[in-house]
Image (spheres, helix red, strand yellow):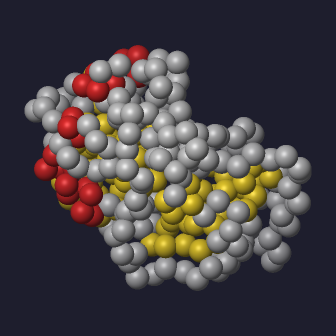
């Protein structure tokens, strides 16, 4: 598909054996992490979270043959995000210290493995819930799903920002410390390839060669197409993203799922938004 029509999904897969086409581009530079300095308040590796129980439920040994969650591979058996439409700020991001099993409930069954990096960038997932010493995070590569980690083997960083997209209003609002900073008119997914609803997060940023991105990096998100058969050929394994657009055409439903921003607005996000920042897409 021509770049002008296929531009919509972002692939952070340059480090994989077979790089994925993204937004109509056949080549791309390796992804880079969002390098905003972490605010004060980070916690050391494996710091236990407050617990309402004297002894957290133990983590069962994972079964053999569990998949590893990657940019292109998801997993099954995880619970749905219980607050998919919540706009409450998520102030902590979590990164595992080494390859770690992730569970379907506190003391439950391991369903997959998480790694410290995903396609070469640090994997920082927003913390959404804490129970009995365990912590739940939003998962990448599967929409509106959470996974649980036991009380050690990870570290957290403070997150200050949040992005809220309202599809019906064609707006994207950037919040810092719970206060709205700026709102822009944006273009969202077409009716057949709608921008996935619910909470997700910023994985990192990727440089793509097509001029349709106005020469600016793309913010790749944890969300993937809800209907992979509906997107352009070659983009089924890509992720949705937030990116600049080369033409002044905003306030429409016409992308393959990404959020298209005015270039000046994209520059603001690139200058301020860190990996792990939560993104909420509302109807």
Q: Quadrant of residue 28?
A: top left
Of residues 181 and 131, the one drawn nearer to the viewer in this rendering: 181
> Does residue 186 lie above or below 217 as drawn?
above
Q: Position of residue 71 (x, y in %)?
A: 56, 45
Q: Please count the marks in the image.
A: 0
Of residues 200 and 274, the one drawn nearer to the viewer in this rendering: 274
Q: Position of residue 223 (x, y in %)?
A: 49, 40
> Does residue 226 lie above or below 210 as drawn?
above
Q: Is residue 197 visible?
A: no
Q: Position of residue 220 (x, y in %)?
A: 40, 47
Q: Is residue 193 left or right of residue 216?
A: right
Which residue shows up at 75% across the image and 45% down it? 67
Q: Quadrant of the N terminus?
A: top left
Q: Is residue 59 visible?
A: yes
Q: Position of residue 236 (x, y in %)?
A: 51, 27
Q: Quadrant of the C terminus?
A: top left
> Does residue 263 lie above or below 158 as drawn?
above
Which residue shows up at 20% across the image and 37% down it? 211
Q: Is residue 116 left or right of residue 232?
A: right
Q: Is residue 268 left or right of residue 275?
A: left
Which residue shows up at 13% across the image and 32% down it? 247
Which residue shows up at 41% across the image and 16% down it? 192
Residue placed furthest toward the left: 248
Q: Quadrant of residue 3?
A: top left
> Does residue 102 lie above or below 177 as drawn?
above
């Amino acid at each position: 598909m021509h770049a002008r029509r296929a531009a919509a999904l972002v692939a952070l897969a340059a480090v994989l054996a077979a790089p994925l086409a993204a937004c109509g581009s056949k080549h791309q530079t390796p992804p880079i992490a969002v390098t905003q300095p972490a605010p004060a308040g980070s916690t050391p590796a494996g710091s236990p979270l407050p617990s309402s129980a004297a002894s957290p439920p133990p983590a069962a040994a994972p079964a053999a043959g569990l998949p590893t969650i990657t940019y292109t591979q998801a997993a099954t058996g995880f619970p749905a995000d219980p607050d998919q439409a919540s706009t409450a700020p998520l102030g902590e991001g979590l990164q595992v210290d080494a390859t770690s099993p992730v569970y379907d409930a506190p003391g439950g069954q391991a369903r997959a493995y998480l790694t410290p990096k995903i396609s070469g960038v640090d994997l920082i997932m927003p913390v959404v819930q804490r129970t009995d010493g365990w912590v739940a995070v939003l998962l990448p590569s599967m929409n509106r799903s959470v996974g649980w980690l036991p009380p050690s083997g990870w570290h957290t960083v403070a997150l200050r920002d949040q992005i809220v997209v309202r599809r019906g209003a064609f707006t994207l609002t950037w919040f810092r410390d719970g206060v709205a900073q700026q709102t822009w008119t944006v273009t969202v997914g077409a009716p057949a390839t709608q921008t996935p609803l619910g909470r997700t997060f910023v994985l990192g940023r990727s440089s793509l060669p097509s001029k349709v991105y106005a020469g600016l990096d793309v913010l790749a998100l944890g969300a993937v197409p809800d209907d992979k058969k509906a997107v352009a050929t070659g983009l089924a394994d890509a992720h949705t993203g937030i990116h600049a657009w080369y033409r002044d055409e905003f306030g429409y439903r016409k992308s393959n799922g990404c959020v298209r921003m005015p270039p000046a607005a994209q520059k603001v996000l690139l200058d301020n938004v860190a990996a792990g920042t939560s993104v909420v897409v509302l109807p």
